[in-house]
Image (tube, rainbow, N blue to C red):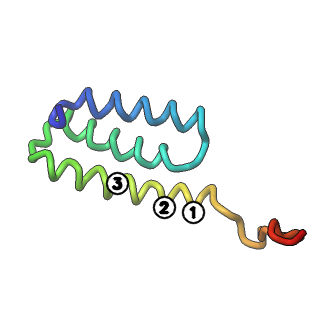
Amino acid sequence: MLETWWGWLAGAAVLAILEILAPVQVFFGVAVGAAAVGIALWLGLAVAWPWLLVIWGLVAGLSWLVLRRALGVRKGQVRIWDDDINEG
């Protein structure tokens, strides 16, 4: 199953839809990694499944960092807490 390109692309689609439903900026990076592996397999990449997982993790981590950099907290945007939940 891990060597089939359509499985990776289907997983990427499910994760992308999950990101739309629950926008937490995590699923999109993992979906990009899965799509990259699926496309690489479709183009003829022939490696063992542990290497596919390594590629998936590296691409997912890199895309998450890029996404975090692009959509994360902007410079000068600081969250200031006025009240402490423990103070009564």
Q: Position of residue 69 (x, y in %)?
A: 57, 63
Which residue lies at the image location 14% right of the left edge and 42% below the top edge?
45
Work out whether 51 lies above or below 6.
below
Q: Secondary structure at mark 1?
A: helix
Q: CA distance from mark 2 to mark 1?
A: 6 Å
Q: As drawn, is 56 to the left or to the right of 2?
A: right
Whether tag 2 and tag 1 are in contact, CB under 8 A, the answer is yes
Whether tag 3 and tag 2 are in contact, CB under 8 A, the answer is no
The residue that label 1 is drawn on is: 69
The residue that label 3 is drawn on is: 59
Q: CA distance from mark 3 to mark 1?
A: 15 Å
Which three-letter amino acid code belongs to the residue tagged 3?
Answer: Val
In the image, which disc is placed on residue 65?
A: 2
Residue 39 in which image quadrant: top left
Work out whether 63 lies above or below 41.
below
Q: Position of residue 16 (x, y in %)?
A: 48, 35
Q: Position of residue 28 (x, y in %)?
A: 48, 44
